[in-house]
Amino acid sequence: MLAQSSTSKSPRTKFLSILRVAAHYAQRVKTLLIKLSIILARSTHKIRLWKSFMVLVLRHSPWNRSVLS
């Protein structure tokens, strides 16, 4: 059943499903980065520095653009 549905999909549909999975994992990586930065900021007491660094990283990253807009 699964093999039949994957062969009947158009290339566009396959591409969009791959993008959807990639966006899901990118979101998880982004969440992990934010959690890691919070832990690091608390342990080193440099919260302002880490906040500005993460804002800079996330502002220029492709993760904040939605794949399926």
Image (spheres, rainbow, N blue to C red):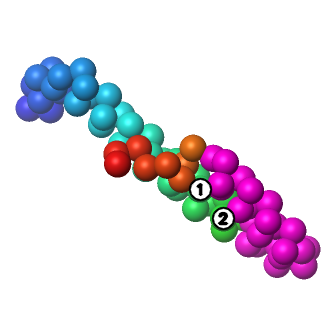
Disc 1 designates what residue?
30
For the point 87% across and 68% down, the residue is 49
User: x, y percentage for residue 42?
Assistant: 82, 78
Task: Answer yes or no: is residue 40 visible.
Answer: no
> Residue 30 vs residue 13: left or right?
right
> Residue 53 vs residue 27: left or right?
right
Q: Residues within 10 Å of mark 1 (few under 14, many from 20)?
A: some
Question: 41 or 57, which is in the foreground?
Answer: 57
Q: CA distance from mark 1 to mark 2?
A: 6 Å
Q: In terms of secondary structure, where does tag 2 sit?
A: helix
Disc 2 designates what residue?
34
Question: 60 or 29, which is in the foreground?
Answer: 60
Is 59 included in the stretch rendered in magenta? yes
1 over 10 or under it: above or below = below
Could you say which quadrant of the image residue 11 lies in?
top left
Q: Quadrant of the N terminus?
A: top left
User: x, y percentage for residue 55?
Assistant: 71, 62
Q: In terms of secondary structure, where does tag 1 sit?
A: helix
Tag 1: residue type? Lys
**Highlighted range, magenta:** 37-61
Tag 2: residue type? Ile
Q: Would you say the residues marked 1 and 2 are in contact, meaning their CB atoms lie under 8 Å apart? A: yes
Disc count in the image?
A: 2
Could you say which quadrant of the image residue 41 lies in?
bottom right
User: x, y percentage for residue 43?
Assistant: 86, 76
